[in-house]
Image (cartoon, rainbow, N blue to C red):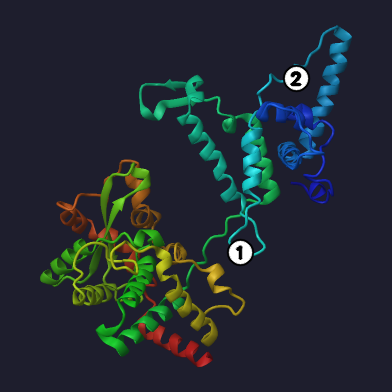
Amino acid sequence: ATIEELEEQDRFMKARPGDHICTSFQCPNCQSQNIRGRDLEPACNIADACFESLAIRATLDAFWARSKSTVSGHVSEARFMARYGEALGFTPMPPLGPFRLGTHNGMMQAIMLEMRAMEKGRKPGTRVNFGTARGVRSTTTVLWDASPASGGDIVLSTGNVKGRYVATLCPSEGRWYSLFSLGVSVRMGDIVKQDRAYTIEVVHAVIDLFEKQFQDEGYGMPVRDFEAALFFIISCMGGFRGYEVVWTDLGALIYDIEYCENLGDTSAVSWPVTGRFKNEHGSWNHYMIPIAGVTGSGVRVFEWTQRIIKRLALIGRTSGWLFRGNDGERRAVASDYAENIYQKLEYLLETTTLIDPGCDIREEFGVQRSGRRFFDTQCLNMKVSTIDIEMQCRWRSDRAKGGKTVKRSMLHTYAEVRNMKTTLLRPSQALMKGYTLGEYVVNKKRWRGAA
């Protein structure tokens, strides 16, 4: 949008001259006939009044998908065409209406989105953002595909899956709805706020707090706190998203640790992730993601893994999910560990200068991606190659496309992973390599002194 447009008081509030020649238009009463089969009576029916206002709102959103200069340019050209047609005795433009009864062009789905956008948001006094409201489009498309109405769709195929195209009559996939969707996203603001990345100092400080708790309580430390410690460490040092960490297979992890201990090789942990993955059509798959036993800045991943295995063995857990819910049976979710981690971050905010004072911990950091973004950021800082980073972090998307780099059955996992250990360990080994433990201790004393 131009500065001129941003300063307009009527933006998204009124139609502009020429909007109707750039975007198909039907009045609210026509749309009521198309969708509900009757005329509007807004003066005596609250539902009719609401329908009318929603239809107007959706129409204005569709109109304002085009910029002022685009609309005015088409108006100028249309005037030239009208003058030339009048001089030559024919009409150079197609009729702009009326439409056949029942042709709402996606207005029904647009009204559903407008209604969805008025639902309450997570925070008091807010409403859902566009990213949430636009889910209506995908749902209506799925419903269309499942209905007899989709019988008019045409499938064009070149003989393989990748060359298959569908010509659909689904209104939510049409031109008018696309313009509406663009307009409403501009009006509402389609802003996605990413989780803030941890810094290396914050990561070490949080791990220090877990370490202090372990030194004080030993294996009497609650299982939930052990899980929170490993959740935080693995998400940061392995480049996992939060919901991926909790897919850890405890039995496979024990197998790998025992194998490494028998070899006397503590240089790495092959972290086992297992489950049914959405982009793999629900098939059960296994991944082994190698993580350095001790990272470049001294995080002892292997030792913490040994600790949690021993702690879980004390309560008889040697198989199944490593991370479990409060009932001890179901697989945990990332949010189960949010409070533990947030409390430690809030403690650092209050007692150190590691986090800026104006930071809203629970708003800016997240257990889903703050660890992952820390990993990516530190790898780039340490000049780890993009290929190595993607080998570590894109294990799901790579495998979904048919690659077999790290995906394998449990029967032949270990031989292949260990053959690639040098390559696969480079990202986690490089995390702040050269940032020695001595330098970290000095910095730690510095920020503790500042508290």
For the residue marked with disc 1, what is the amino acid? Lys
Which of 72/94 is in front? 94
Dividing the picture into quadrants, the one containing residue 113 is top right
Q: Position of residue 204 (x, y in %)?
A: 40, 78
Give the number of the disc on residue 98.
Answer: 2
Asked whether residue 24 appears in the rendered view, the answer is: no
Furthest-left residue in this view: 262
- Report the residue at 58% width, 33% height from top: 172
Give the number of the disc on residue 63.
Answer: none
Marks 1/2 in contact by CB < 8 Å: the verdict is no
- Report the residue at 80% width, 39% height from top: 44
Which of 251/375 is in front? 251
For the residue marked with disc 2, what is the amino acid? Pro
Dividing the picture into quadrants, the one containing residue 401 is top left
Say above or below: 316 vs 427: below
Q: Position of residue 325 (x, y in %)?
A: 34, 66
- The answer to whether 261 appears left or right of 448 in the picture is left
Say above or below: 251 vs 178: below
Separation of residues labelled 1 and 2 (CA atoms):
44 Å
Q: Position of residue 286 (x, y in %)?
A: 25, 52
Give the number of the disc on residue 123.
Answer: 1
Which of 386/327 is in front? 327
- The answer to whether 64 appears left or right of 433 in the picture is right
